[in-house]
Amino acid sequence: FVKENTSVHLWKLEEDCATLAALLQDDEQASKINKQYQSPFRQREAFAEQILLKQVLGKAVRLRHRDNGAPFLENSSQHISISHTKQWIAIALNHKHGIGIDMEKCSERVHHVASRFLQRKEQKDLAAGNPQEVLIKETILWSAKESLFKMSGCGTANDMTRFRLFPFPLSDEGEIQARIFSHGHGYTFSVFYKRIGDSVLTLCEFRPVHSS
């Protein structure tokens, strides 16, 4: 689907490594992936990334990663962001702006670690909801902060409390206002979210709607 200037491409992964290696149709690249990653799970993700990008762009591309782990396309000005769950791979592409995409599965694990990534105000905002709604919202907020981190590069993945997310009505999809403070300035962004089965997807463009 397309959101603003960003195209989002999803693949529900059900294939094993051998099937994905055959779909890649590139023995040299398949060999590199097998040598680079020891984990079959990570090999599966890498195969899927290359296959999906080839389908979307119409040609084979070289996907690389910066020192901080952020992906980029070699010899291309397109911005890219990638996320995985055990079931899904999500790739976002944008010609104009930096982007961040994330997918997370709703689970009790999110609730148990919520205090690590939510500000006190955010926790208070959630307190009035029923338990199931709270869990879904916690997952959306966690995913939104992951997307903001990928988009902005601010802070570290272990310091998600630097991002302030404001209350939002729960729906199948919607937008959340987010505030980032950097170098003495505050920037407001809009984070899109979408519920997909028992998972959530969030997306953010590096296009502040307000700064101060």
Image (spheres, rainbow, N blue to C red):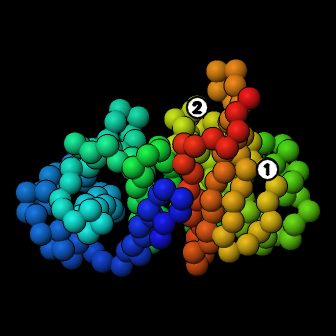
The residue furthest top is 184
In the picture of the structure, the residue carrying the numbered disc 1 is: 166
Image quarter where the C terminus lies is top right
The amino acid marked with disc number 1 is Phe
Q: Is the residue under label 2 in contact with that under label 1 (CB below 8 Å)? A: no
Q: Nearer the viewer, residue 75 or 127?
A: 75
Residue 176 at x, y percent in the picture: 71, 55
- Which image quarter: residue 175? bottom right
The amino acid marked with disc number 2 is Gly
Badge count: 2
Residue 35 at x, y percent in the picture: 16, 51
The residue that appears at 62% across and 59% down in the rendered structure is: 192
Disc 2 secondary structure class: loop
**Residue 26 relative to residue 17: left or right:** left
The residue furthest right is 128
Residue 135 at x, y percent in the picture: 74, 65
Q: Which mark is residue 155?
A: 2
- Which image quarter: residue 189? top right
Asked whether residue 18 appears in the rendered view, the answer is no
State the separation of the CA atoms marked 1 and 2. 19 Å
Asked whether residue 15 appears in the rendered view, the answer is yes
The residue that appears at 58% across and 43% down in the rendered structure is: 207
The residue that appears at 44% across and 46% down in the rendered structure is: 96
